[in-house]
Image (cartoon, rainbow, N blue to C red):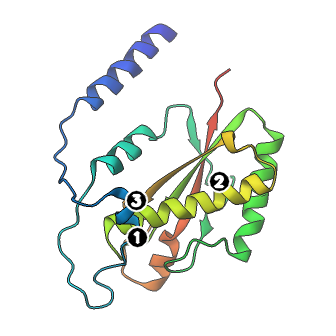
Amino acid sequence: MKQALLVFIIAGILISGCAQRKVASSPETPSMATEKTREGETGGKKGPEKITDQRDLKIESKEKTPEAREVSDLFDDVHFDYDKYAIRADAKSVLKRVADYLVKKGSEKVLIEGHCDERGTTEYNLGLGDRRAKAAKDYLVSLGVPSSHINTISYGKEKPLCSLQTEDCWAKNRRDHFVLVKAAL
């Protein structure tokens, strides 16, 4: 039974990996993309956004595995101020609970998902989400969690919790979300 399940999972991965994606090539390097300012918010023209191959590979390579499980009922999301990635005072108690749990349960790892609100370009928000996830990772490491037990990914503005165009909604989307991953035995 386990072998059949394993074959099924591998076949699913291979089939989904073979799908054709149409990706616009970007003349910028990925490091340039994260340094862009948010277009469209200060009156600048907002043209079509470009998706880079590297961003697609980053997202595909770190998608949740069957061993991953959501922990939204265990830990609150950590929220951020507009266009910032500094850890707020109200987030420190949440991160302390995450760190205590990971230190106590040494066989589990966590994936930190960085999210942004819908304002700004795709490239900018992917970079900002990455910095938010890394800020949380650095804070957890400072609390004694081994760096090898923490992975990060940025979804930018691709997976919003709320789709209304209000400040309350945007504030809900500026977050880090935690997903526990059982370590292979």
Mark whose residue sits in front, 2 or 1 = 1
Find residue 95 and report its horizontal and vertical position in percent.
Answer: 73, 60
Q: Is residue 147 left or right of residue 160?
A: right
Residue identifier under label 3:
159
Residue of label 2: 73
Mark 1 / mark 3, whichever is N-terminal: 1
In the rendered image, residue 180, in percent from the top left (x then y), is placed at 63, 42
CA gap, disc 2 and disc 1: 35 Å
Q: Residue at x 35, y 78 (%)?
A: 38
Q: Crowding near pointer 3: few (<14 within 10 Å), some, many (20+)?
A: some
The quadrant in which residue 160 appears is bottom left
Q: Which mark is residue 35?
A: 1
Which residue is depicted at the point 69% across and 45% down?
A: 147
Of residues 127 and 10, the one drawn nearer to the viewer in this rendering: 127
Name which residue type carries label 3. Lys
Which residue corresponds to the image point at 28% horizontal and 83% vertical from the top-left? 40
Dot 1, how many residues are within 10 Å of its Cα: few (below 14), some (14-19), or many (20+)? few
Q: Is residue 2 above or below residue 61?
A: above
Name the residue type under label 2: Asp
Identify which amino acid the numbered label 1 is placed on: Glu
Q: Quadrant of the C terminus?
A: top right
